[in-house]
Amino acid sequence: MLAQFAALFFFLQAAHPQAAFSAERQAPAEALAVMADLEAKSNQLELLTRSYPKMPDPRAAEHQRNQLRTEIQALCGRLSNLRGEHRRAREKNALLGMRQLATEANSKAKPDAPASNFLFSFLQEYNFEESMSPIDQKSQAALAKDKEAYEAVLRAFRIRRLMRISLFILFFLLCAAGVAAYLLRLPDLKPGFILKDNYRVEHELARGETWTVYAATDIGLGRKVALKCVRDKFFSGLQQREAFLNAARAAALLKHPNIAEIYAAFAEAGRVFLVSELVEGHPLDSFLKAGRPFPPATMKAVARQAASALDYARAQKIPHGGLKPSDLMLSREGTVKVLDFAIVRGASRAAPAPDSETASLAALIAAMALGRPLRTPEEAQSLPNPLGGILRDPCARRSCAELATALDAVPYPVRGR
């Protein structure tokens, strides 16, 4: 049978068996060196992989990582080539050994040691090839684990960096907003301060919860004006502020001797300003604080002039909508001026009722008769006749002038009970 195998591979070209066995021994020797180097590099990569989570920036290890991965991949490739070379040499030796056995069997000569021990050598070398697989698998597993760990750590690092950048941008925007708010904030309107390059502040006249009034000079026209600064909290939003400015522009069309004329309305530095006629005098509510009823002639004169202003404005479809004692200014010349048409209308979201003007005027008449602000609306109706009679149903009057005419008919002052 050996002769038949020898005949089968007789025509195969091969070197002398001793030379073939010598070449076969060289491949395992190099493979052992490659395997030792591969295991060392794989161990280094595993140590590097475990250090990624502790690094502030995993990209700092990218150069070392890429170098190790390149070397491991090259060593894996070289080990695979050595395995192939060893396998081919072993197969060639097998063929040559079988031919030599056949030759020795035919010549009945004693086999040489390499040829007679071929089968044992074959098994040993085969086991050597198998020993290459674990280190190769270990190296491939180290590469895969490194890739997964590095990508996970890098992804987490990028998320953290993105969050830091987002926080920095948010902080920057908040700082920018703060700086802008500081730069655009309304400065203290001290004497000499100029708004719109035209209105020079002289001094403060009055202050309320949501507004401050200053005496100012219109530099362009050379006249004294009242400058009312309306604070931001007066408005619930930009829409209401725009409604206020629109109301001010509409009220600027009113031209009546008993209405304080509005000259301009504008927004600057996040605030709204009204420029109006400067009325030198005192508001009606300052007289009511004294607690003394108004003289009949004064009360009737105030009511008559206020009624004229309210009826005129309502005819222009610009009702006041909320007349209060502070909205009437008594000038030094004895003229009544109605203020703040824009303030009341701009703050209200609903249109005033048609009879609200007469009701407001009736309340003012009652307050002047009592010499103090009304505590409740019913106080006006509780006044004794004949004044109480004309104030009990003011909404039945067709106009404020009609109510003022009825007041003129009252022959004497009436004191509250």
Image (cartoon, grey):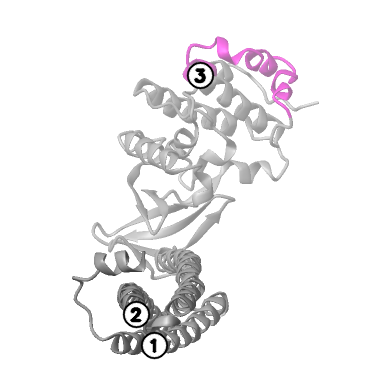
Which is nearer the eye, 329 or 40?
Answer: 40
Looking at marks 2 and 1 on the same chain, the residue that comes earlier in the sequence is marked by: 2
Specify which label sits upstream in the sequence, 1 or 3: 1
Q: Position of residue 16 (x, y in %)?
A: 26, 86
| Amino acid on which the number 2 mark rests in the picture | Glu
User: At 65% from the left edge and 35% from the top edge, which residue is drawn?
Assistant: 294
Q: Are marks 1 and 3 in contact (CB under 8 Å)?
A: no
Which quadrant does the C terminus fall into?
Answer: top right
Percent position of residue 405, x then y = 52, 17
State which mark lies toward you, 1 or 3. Answer: 1
Name the residue tied to disc 1. 112
**Which of the 4 image quadrants contains residue 193?**
bottom left
Q: In terms of secondary structure, where does tag 1 sit?
A: loop
Q: Which residue is mark 2?
A: 104
User: Which mark, residue 353?
Assistant: 3
**Which is nearer the eye, 381 or 142?**
142
**Nearer to the camera, 183 or 358:** 183
Q: Is residue 380 left or right of residue 273?
A: right
Q: Secondary structure at mark 2?
A: helix
Nearest the viewer among 78 and 329 is 78
The amino acid marked with disc number 3 is Ala
Quarter of the image holding residue 218? bottom left
Q: Does the residue at mark 2 contact the one at mark 1 (Cβ under 8 Å)?
A: yes
The magenta span reads 376-404
Which residue is located at x 66 percent, y 14 percent?
392
